Image (cartoon, rainbow, N blue to C red):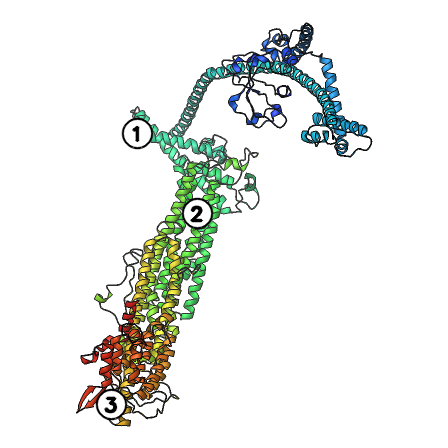
């Protein structure tokens, strides 16, 4: 009962129909849609069961008395429930929800709203307030009627209930006043309970003292109070139903007590349920009345909306019907006005023609020449003038100019078909006389206007375009009068005469240093070309000339910026101004006259063949060229850069100033209250005119700089080549010119950037024969001097900076990016060619040729004195210093010119990347790669020659020096079996730790290592010293296996020598395992014959076990080295035979003797050992 009673009622309203149809629907069929996000309490939805079509809709009386759903409704479907027992509409499927009628009274004709007051109104004339007032009256009447109806139904229900009719199901319905009283009591009780919330909650948890009956009574009273709080104020109670049930049975220890408590609680709940049900019924009835009142007022709004829709349709129909007619009438009026204006203009033109014809006829009849010029210019008083005052008064200049333009148009139209009726000779004569008078009058009026314009402009004054009134102030230029004169002169050949005069006045008054003959600038320029002063005076003149040129550029920019504003305000006038409209009125500048004037001014200032900027610059360049020395060329390069930089800034500012011509300042004199923005509207034609002027400026800039760029590029490349060659020439070196066939590799990176005459520097390498004559000392103090190596790079960086300033980095388009990229690539390519083929390549080749790989023929005197400088082993220390300087120069070349990934360096790589030219960047990378590859190849060749030289001198020291000492000491032939420095007899004492040859050799190698380490990089040093270590091993091993025999005492000496050589070889590099193998092999000379087997194959005695020297060095190599023992062979009957222990050892091991045949010594070199080791790994 509570769940059904709390169901929210539904207010349904159908969407309003289209205005044209205005189909009114009854209140009972109105529906509405649920608004998204609205609270559930405000929504108007009802639940639709699955058998909704079969549910009978009961009337209000039955609904009030049944206390639930009618039994004819069938089974109620299961829906989601809320915590309070109501259906949760937000969890329901929309298909389960349907709209119901506004109230149960809508289904009974008896309780249908009458709307008598509302329908009695005049729908077309009643106001909205009257409609709302009538609706309120109908709502009040309907409420009274419904209350009477409910009382009647209640009385019938009581009678039915008294007779015992169970199917009636009616309930007693209180009157409206009783319902109001119950509502007040319910609200009063709720407010009282809200005030006692804290007390009720506290008391229900407070223990009770007293007898058992008193405690039970008090506990039940507190529980009833808490239950009322839970029902009346569920949001304020702070307790829930489960807690109330726990408190109810908390003190009930026996069954009787529990039964008594539950019985009393049941009675209390029944009373509360009755009260709640009655409150719900009261709320339902109140909502039904409010709903009916709402629908009645909604009908008033519907009437107003329908009336507004009718009126809108009528207005729309009238607009469509009458608008076409009005449009036709307007077009006809405009056409009539245009024809009227044409007639007025033709009438005025005829009168003016008759006037001029009359004057011409009077002049011809009287024979007295009409003084047109004097009258027009005002030389004759107005009272004596014979011409129309229109042409003699300055106030009517604009009207006179327009009239003369129209008359000249008539004169020009004589030859067309419309004037072919002038066949009468008299008429033709009169026409000719009149036309001549018109031409004279036009020429006189134009001359007067131009002269007036010139006088006002020559008077000068400050340019102030803030307002028309500013032009009349003292010291200000009267640009309003200039504008009126320019407007009048526009009727004479479009104002071309005025434009020429204006340009001439500007250039002569604003640029006297350019356009006035005999000026100070002109005389200094021409006198400077014939002067023969000394170098200091020339330098001073050049600096002053460049300063004057810079000042001139600033002057041009300032004047043109100011004149652009004047042009925009004076020459921007409307072509449709009528009589008397000669005041300031900004227009859209669609005639582009200001841009024509500005273009003529710029062309005169820049491109004048005698006095323009370009002519002055050419004169300055010619005066520099007459000196003809390279110092003058350097000055010319600097002048090129200064001119280009200043010109670029000039044209940039001129372009910015040209764009402001679209926005002339000032306000109209006729409408001063209008804002300036109203006169600054842009148009497409304005944009095209400005673009044309900017394009013209760009063309002038390209024309000015193109010839200078070509001349600059040729001079830059020529001077760069000269400065680089001069750096070498100052050192005393000689340069040779290659044959044409040798210069075929010269690069073509420039392409056509400088035109057909682009300079290509010749390849002039250093003379190698002359470099050989000066030797190492001459190279280090000459071409390889640090200052000489840096000087070409400094000149190249200066060239790059000038080229970057001259060509930019691609701003502005028009091929600048490609031109810049090609120029930078050309300079870098020329430097690669010079620094490589002309400079470093010949030097590094000569360094290698200066080394003599052949050692001296005489053996060295060993040992060397370690207190004296060590011998250089054929490679002078200056060689390594030269290699180090060449390597440093190559790194400086890459760092100072290429500078990859160095932000802000402004070198080749950064500039080419900024231009975005992938082709030029690729060409430059190829040039750089080719330069370093060839330099590396030539450097490797020289270093390999140094390695060969050191190797031959090592053999000279070890073999020639060491064996020569043995010959002098023991005086026996080395061809004998017992020969060699290590065939020391048994019992001999070892005087020194090492042999003299090895001691001297290690002393020389350690000294040489210091020079090599300073010259080579760590990677190159490691590779070089590893190769030297392998060659040292090969020299010692070859001599050992071919010529030396080793005794057990000599083996000790040999071991010491090998250890000394190994320590030197391991100063650098990583691959020195061949020395470790040699150290192991030396044990075969120190071991007695009976223990050799263990040394060779290990303690197991198995030759294939991989142990011993067989496993470390290999069977063949171990046996070959063992064969150099002094006791390996013995002499029997003058024939050398193997010793007995050798034969037995070989038979025991089961291996043949490799020395029985020819022994290939190359198989035991360091490289062979390395290859074998790599193969095994």
**Element class at badge 2:** helix
- Packing grade of label 3 (10 A; few <14, some 14-19, many >=20) is many
Left/right placement of residue 262 relative to residue 845 reads right
**853 lies above or below 934:** below
Give the x, y percent position of residue 566: 48, 44
Give the x, y percent position of residue 395: 50, 34
Q: CA distance from mark 2 to mark 3?
A: 101 Å
Q: Which quadrant of the figure has residue 1020?
A: bottom left
**Element class at badge 3:** loop
Q: Earlier in the sequence, mark 2 or mark 1?
A: 1
**263 lies above or below 153:** below
What's the residue at 29%, 78% (across, down)?
A: 1096
Q: Quadrant of the C terminus?
A: bottom left
User: Which residue lies under the disc numbered 3?
Assistant: 978
User: Which residue lies under the disc numbered 2?
Assistant: 655
Q: Toward the viewer: 796 or 11? A: 11
Give the x, y percent position of residue 715: 33, 62
Q: Toward the viewer: 475 or 269? A: 269
- Packing grade of label 2 (10 A; few <14, some 14-19, many >=20) is many
**Element class at badge 1:** helix
Q: Earlier in the sequence, mark 2 or mark 3?
A: 2
User: Which residue lies under the disc numbered 1?
Assistant: 415
Q: Nearer the viewer, mark 2 or mark 3?
A: 3
**650 lies above or below 335:** below
Residue sitting farthest toward the right: 210
């Amino acid at each position: 009962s509570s769940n059904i009673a709390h169901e929210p009622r539904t207010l349904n309203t159908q969407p309003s129909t289209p205005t044209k149809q205005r189909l009114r629907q009854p209140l009972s069929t109105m529906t509405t849609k649920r608004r998204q996000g609205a609270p559930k309490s405000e929504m108007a939805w009802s639940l639709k069961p699955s058998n909704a079509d079969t549910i009978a809709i009961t009337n209000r009386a039955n609904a009030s008395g049944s206390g639930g759903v009618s039994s004819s409704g069938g089974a109620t479907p299961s829906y989601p429930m809320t915590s309070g027992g109501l259906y949760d509409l937000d969890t329901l499927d929309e298909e389960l929800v349907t709209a119901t009628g506004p109230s149960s009274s809508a289904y009974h004709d008896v309780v249908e709203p009458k709307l008598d007051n509302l329908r009695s109104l005049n729908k077309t004339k009643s106001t909205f307030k009257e409609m709302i007032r009538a609706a309120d009256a109908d709502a009040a009447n309907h409420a009274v009627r419904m209350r009477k109806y409910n009382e009647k139904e209640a009385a019938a229900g009581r009678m039915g209930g008294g007779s015992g009719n169970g199917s009636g199901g009616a309930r007693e319905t209180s009157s409206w006043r009783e319902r109001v009283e119950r509502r007040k009591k319910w609200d009063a009780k709720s407010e009282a309970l809200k005030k006692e919330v804290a007390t009720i909650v506290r008391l229900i948890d407070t223990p009770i003292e007293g007898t058992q009956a008193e405690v039970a009574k008090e506990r039940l009273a507190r529980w009833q109070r808490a239950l009322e709080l839970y029902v009346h104020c569920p949001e304020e109670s702070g307790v829930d139903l489960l807690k109330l049930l726990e408190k109810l049975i908390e003190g009930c220890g026996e069954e009787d007590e529990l039964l008594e408590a539950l019985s009393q609680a049941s009675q209390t709940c029944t009373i509360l349920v009755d009260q709640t049900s009655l409150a719900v019924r009261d709320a339902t009835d109140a909502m039904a009345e409010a709903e009916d009142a709402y629908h009645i007022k909604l009908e008033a709004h519907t009437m107003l909306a329908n009336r507004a829709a009718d009126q809108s349709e009528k207005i729309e129909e009238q607009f469509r019907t009458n608008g076409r007619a009005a449009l036709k009438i307007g077009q006809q009026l405009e056409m009539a006005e245009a024809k009227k204006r044409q007639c007025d203009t033709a009438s005025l033109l005829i009168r003016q023609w008759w006037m001029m014809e009359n004057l011409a006829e009077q002049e011809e009849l009287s024979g007295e020449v009409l003084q047109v010029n004097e009258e027009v210019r005002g030389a004759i008083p107005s009272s004596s003038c014979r011409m129309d005052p229109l042409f003699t008064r300055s106030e009517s200049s604009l009207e006179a100019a327009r009239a003369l333009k129209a008359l000249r148009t008539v004169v020009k139209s004589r030859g067309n078909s419309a004037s072919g009726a002038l066949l009468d000779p008299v008429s033709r004569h009169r026409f000719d006389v009149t036309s001549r008078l018109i031409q004279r009058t036009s020429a006189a009026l134009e001359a007067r206007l131009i002269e007036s314009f010139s006088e006002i402009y020559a008077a000068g004054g400050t340019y102030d375009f803030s307002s028309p009134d500013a032009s009349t102030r003292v010291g200000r230029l009267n640009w309003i009068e200039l504008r009126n004169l320019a407007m009048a002169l526009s009727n004479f050949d479009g104002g071309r005469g005025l434009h020429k005069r204006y340009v001439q006045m500007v250039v002569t008054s604003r640029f006297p240093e350019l356009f006035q003959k005999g000026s100070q600038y002109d005389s200094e320029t021409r006198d400077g070309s014939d002067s023969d002063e000394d170098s200091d005076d020339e330098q001073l003149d050049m600096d002053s000339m460049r300063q004057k040129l810079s000042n001139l550029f600033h002057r041009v920019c300032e004047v043109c910026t100011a004149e652009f504003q004047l042009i925009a305000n004076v020459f921007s006038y409307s072509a449709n101004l009528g009589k008397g409209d000669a005041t300031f009125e900004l227009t859209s500048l669609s005639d582009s006259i200001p841009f024509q004037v500005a273009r003529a001014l710029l062309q005169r200032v820049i491109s004048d063949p005698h006095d323009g900027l370009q002519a002055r610059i050419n004169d300055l360049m010619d005066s520099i060229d007459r000196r003809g020395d390279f110092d003058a060329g350097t000055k010319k390069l600097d002048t090129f850069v200064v001119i280009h930089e200043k010109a670029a800034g000039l044209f940039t500012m001129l372009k910015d100033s040209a764009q402001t011509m679209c926005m002339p300042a000032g306000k109209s004199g006729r409408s001063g209250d209008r804002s300036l923005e109203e006169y600054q509207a842009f148009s497409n034609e304005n944009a095209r005119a400005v673009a044309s002027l900017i394009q013209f400026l760009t063309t002038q800039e390209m024309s000015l700089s193109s010839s200078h760029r070509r001349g600059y590029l040729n001079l830059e490349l020529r001077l760069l080549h000269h400065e680089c060659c001069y750096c070498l020439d100052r050192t005393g070196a000689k340069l040779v010119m290659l044959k044409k066939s040798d210069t075929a590799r010269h690069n073509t990176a420039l392409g056509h950037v400088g035109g057909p005459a682009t300079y290509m520097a010749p390849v002039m390498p250093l003379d190698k024969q002359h470099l050989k004559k000066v030797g190492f000392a001459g190279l280090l103090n000459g071409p390889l001097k640090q200052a000489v190596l840096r000087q070409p790079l400094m000149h190249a960086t200066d060239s790059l900076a000038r080229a970057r300033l001259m060509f930019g980095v691609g701003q502005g388009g028009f091929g600048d990016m490609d031109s810049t990229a090609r120029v930078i690539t050309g300079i870098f390519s020329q430097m690669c060619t010079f620094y490589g083929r002309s400079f470093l390549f010949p030097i590094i080749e000569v360094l290698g040729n200066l080394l003599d790989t052949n050692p001296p023929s005489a053996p060295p005197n060993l040992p060397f004195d370690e207190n004296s400088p060590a011998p250089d082993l054929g490679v002078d220390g200056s060689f390594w210093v030269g290699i180090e300087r060449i390597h440093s120069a190559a790194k400086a070349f890459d760092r100072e010119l290429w500078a990859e990934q160095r932000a802000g360096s402004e070198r080749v790589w950064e500039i080419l990347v900024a231009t975005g030219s992938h082709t030029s960047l690729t060409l430059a990378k190829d040039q750089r790669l080719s330069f370093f590859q060839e330099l590396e190849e030539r450097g490797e060749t020289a270093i390999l020659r140094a390695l060969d030289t050191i190797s031959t001198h090592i053999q000279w020291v070890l073999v020639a020096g060491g064996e020569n000492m043995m010959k002098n000491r023991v005086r026996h032939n080395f061809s004998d079996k017992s020969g060699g420095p290590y065939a020391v007899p048994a019992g001999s004492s070892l005087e020194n730790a090492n042999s003299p040859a090895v001691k001297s050799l290690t002393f020389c190698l350690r000294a040489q290592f210091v020079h090599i380490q300073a010259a080579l990089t760590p990677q190159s040093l490691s590779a070089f010293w590893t190769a030297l270590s392998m060659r040292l091993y090969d020299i010692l091993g070859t001599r050992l296996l071919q010529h030396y025999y080793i005794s057990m005492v000599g083996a000790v000496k040999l071991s010491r020598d090998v250890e000394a050589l190994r320590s030197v070889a391991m100063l650098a590099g990583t691959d020195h395992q061949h020395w470790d193998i040699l150290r192991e092999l030396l044990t075969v000379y120190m071991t007695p014959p009976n223990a050799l087997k263990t040394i060779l194959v290990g303690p197991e005695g198995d030759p294939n076990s991989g142990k011993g020297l067989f496993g470390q060095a290999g069977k063949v190599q171990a046996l070959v080295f063992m064969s150099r023992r002094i006791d390996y062979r013995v002499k029997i009957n003058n024939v050398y035979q193997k010793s007995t222990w050798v034969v037995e050892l070989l038979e025991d091991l089961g291996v043949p003797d490799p020395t029985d045949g020819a022994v290939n010594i190359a198989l035991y070199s360091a490289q062979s050992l390395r290859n074998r080791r790599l193969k095994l790994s």
